[in-house]
Amino acid sequence: MRGTVFTETMLGTVRLDGEPEERRVRLDLRADADRVLLPHRTTPARLTGRVRIAGHADDPRAEGELQVSPIARRRIRYRLAFTADGRRLTLDGWKSVTPRHPLASMTVLPFTVYEGQARVGEGVLRFPLATGLLPFLLGFRFPRREDPARHSAPRWNGAPGRTEVWYTTLTDPASGTGVWLHHELTAPADGSEPFAHGWAAVFPREGEVRHARFGPVPWTRPADGFTAEDVTCSGGRLTGSAGDLRWKLTEQPQGQPLFTFPRWAWRHPVLPAAQMLPSARATYEGEISYGGTTMDLRGAPGASARIYGHGNAHRWAWLHADLGSGDVLEVVAAVSTRPALRRLPPLVFLRLRRNGRTWPRRPERPAIGGPGPGRFRAAIGLPEWTVTGRTALRRIRVEVNQPPERTLTLEYRDPDGSRAVCRNSESADARIVLERWWGHWRPEATWTLDGTAHAETGTR
Amino acid sequence: MTADGLVAALLADEDGTGWPARVPHRLDAVLAALPRPARAGMRAAVAAVETYALARTGRRLAALRPDEREDVLRSLALRPRLAPLLDLLKVPVLLAAGTERTRVVPPPVPAPADPPLDCTPAGEWPARTTADAVVVGSGAGGAMAARTLARAGLGVVVLEEGGHHPTASFGRRAPLDRFTELYRDGGATVAVGGPPVLLPVGRAVGGTTVVNSGTCYRTPDHVLTRWRSTFGFALAERFGPLLDETERTLRVAPQPLDVLGNNGLLTLTGAERLGWRAAPLRRNAPGCKGSCQCVVGCPTGAKQSVQLSVLPDACAAGARIVTGARVHRILLDHDVPGPPRAAGVRARRPDGGELEILSPLVVVAAGTLQTPPLLRRSGLGGHPRLGRNLSVHPATSVAGRFAEPVTAWRGVLQSVGVEELHADGILVEATASPPGMSSFVLPGLGRELRRELEGSDRLATLGAMIADRPSGRVLGRDRAFVRYDLDPRDGGRLMTAVRAMGRLLFAAGATEVLTGVPGAPRARSLEALDELLAPVGARDLHVSAFHPTGTAAAGGDPQRAPADPEGRLRGVHGVLVADGSVLPGCPEVNPQLSIMAAALAVTDAWLAGAGHGG
């Protein structure tokens, strides 16, 4: 199901009780609906944005509700709570849509301002057609709205030679320690019984990386998530133990799913493997202990991801970077194991979710380029590897540094028994530079992650 | 339009000085308050008379000598078919003349301060507000509904098209000025049909209760039984205690004799001599001073119109009144499961602006004549019986001339009820007119009319209203267009009532009875009256009508009643009907208590039942 996101700016005046003059008002709003906005239906949406009343209020964290029903109810109603001079006020008003005056009725918003139940002012806002219509129309987006939980169910269909992974990486904001929980189902290519196994690892800011494996144990075919004896990962809960590592966490998804590979590649397993994040980012609460150390996690940022396919790539690099303010960068660069494809440079899948929007718009774009050249490039190496690429008006450079002392080397085994070596760091460094073309390249955003990036490279 | 020539002719103004000289200007003020069609009709009629004078004498009426004017009128009076039209011309002229001739009696005591109301003019009310309940109309039904809902804790907003007229404002102006302001269409609302019927309704905070006579009859038991059994109006069962409560609220009591006035006393005398049942009416006017101005706003604050009795309670419980707000339509949410749901109202301000109030409950109490157009404007006029089933109380009046001055305008306006013929659907009530505002159409033209006018202090007037068969219909969307055709049975009742009133007046000692019928104006004995009225039919009478009811009737049959037995409008959620239109049939008495009890019952039922969900 898709939702609707749009932004709207309105200008007007308000007369507050007890004041002789009107004040100018400006509303910069972002509306976020859980379903596609259809004019003949009633669509509720969440409102966030900035309310400015000249000399009285400037609240960038205004929140409220929007009800869009231009035909069914002939009404578009705004209710917005904001703070003005320390007072909590509510703006309540609606546009009354009438076919006799379509333009005026769709753009004029009379409103009343309340403090609690008491009326404290009234005014009129207008949508500036001349300057606002084009950005308003171009700003409409219909993002998918999915329940992250539906992606935790096992994908394996019983075919031999498959592997399926549920992995979680996070960073304890208090200690800076990185955590990696890897849950894997392997269905050997020789048709023998599938088994579950995995490992847990912690990457303390000081001291050496610790890890421990669990399993293998027979796969019990759970309906949801992953279960291997005392290790479970389902329903937003992660519990288990491996060696002296113990964990008991709850996961709170913070965003919509992020498909690093094209959605079709996840839905129809035609590629050797595909990866996705049920929620682009998540926060974690709970406890992790190892040795004599116990970490009490509160709102630890991280993410869970899923992999399903035939096995690991020939070479690969992966990055999950929580950029703050809800922004996330996910990168997978991989070289296929297929004989002919093995000679190609890495295919890059890069997804930057920023301000609720994902760039590049199509996930195929970084991997195969636009029409002709233009695909993103990766230089996989250690301790540094980079990814660069550009679209028409933006370009990005991702530099990842996996310091050897904060990197864990592990052996992977594919369903066909072949081996790979993975070098993983959940406390890697990264620098991301995003630029935008405006006559020349101008910096748009720069992020520097100091020990909070989650990265991995793999080789044969 | 200044019809000075016609006025001078009708009033036989010989020298152009004194009070008749002021009448044309007063007439202009009266006509300015009338709706445009009525004004146009008057203008045409005046032009026609002037043209006749021009054709007959070569000069306009104003340029003629008094004898010549008299000659023109005499010539017009010789044409019987013109008599009803001339009477229509006479009515506003007589009103204006009465006002200029009679010094307005100031109220005997200074007006007391009214209980406080929370009134806000529509221009000062925000364009967008919300409420738990919106009540459309502040009359008998609306006020009661607002009070009930406000006392239940709901945030109530009452929208009233008219203005707020405090008691103190009544004593400052002439009755005629108040009349044109307090009534819709300047008091000239007319039901088209045979015969055309004048149907005045109030428009102010308090609705028609501000301008009614204060007579408070309980709904008769046989009427309640009929409403319940024939129409399935289940709430009628609960009327007993609700009528008690309404009477307590309005402080209803029999009118004491001390201020009854000669009009009422003569009626009592006549009834006693005839052995008829008659008594001072029960009224909601404790401490009435006998100002005889009920119908233009009681200047002493004695009459407990709902703006003095119910609305203050409602406001004390949190209700707010918006004045000058004409509700244009009820807003509906169509995209809900089942029938559409009320979402609020849109109202127009006097300056043309609009305001909207969102509310999940809309109580329609706009009055029997305005509720159907409002529902049609709102897209809720689909029920085939909406606007039909209009019942009124057709009424006519008869005057008796007495040897001694009666001065009917000193005393209670509607003072005595004669119930001898009530079983036959005829209720006779001694009803005078406010000073200078005689509603009785005096006979004659020119000098004869002037003589009648000069001698009008010797007239006692009786009015009779009859229980009708519902034979009217309210049409229209933007404006109410009322069609009413008097049922033949009801025409017979009206003639019976005229004879009965004549008999009563003769019994009281009247030397002459004026019938108001142009072709049979006066009789000096009962026998002469019978003989006079023999060829007269109801269509010849000047018929007014009061107390319209039944246009959005509640009842058990979904095919026949637009509202369900608990007063909820069918085909929509969240709309209650709580005015005279919800009554399923003619209440046969002055209906204020019945309407208030019905509004109380409807809102009580909504609060008690699953009304919140539907």
Image (cartoon, coloured by chain):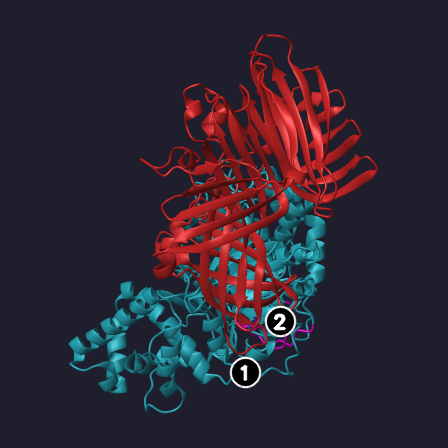
**Amino acid on which disc 1 is placed:** Arg
The quadrant holding residue B445 is bottom left
**In the displayed structure image, the side of residue B247 where residue B2 appears, left or right:** left
Q: Nearer the viewer, residue A276 or A72?
A: A276
Q: Is residue B323 in view?
A: no
User: As drawn, which residue projects farthest toward the top?
Assistant: A191
Rendering coords of residue B299 (x, y %): 59, 77
The residue where tag 2 is placed is B265
Position of residue A454 measured from the top left corner of the image (x, y, whole percent): 61, 39
Q: Chain B takes which shade in the image?
A: cyan
Task: Supply the letter of whichever chain is red.
Answer: A
Instruction: Identify the chain of the residue marked 2, using the numbered disc in the image.
Output: B
Q: Position of residue B170 (x, y in %)?
A: 56, 77
For the residue pair B381 and A28, the one nearer the viewer reads as A28
The residue at which mark 1 appears reads as B172
Magenta part of the chain: B287-304
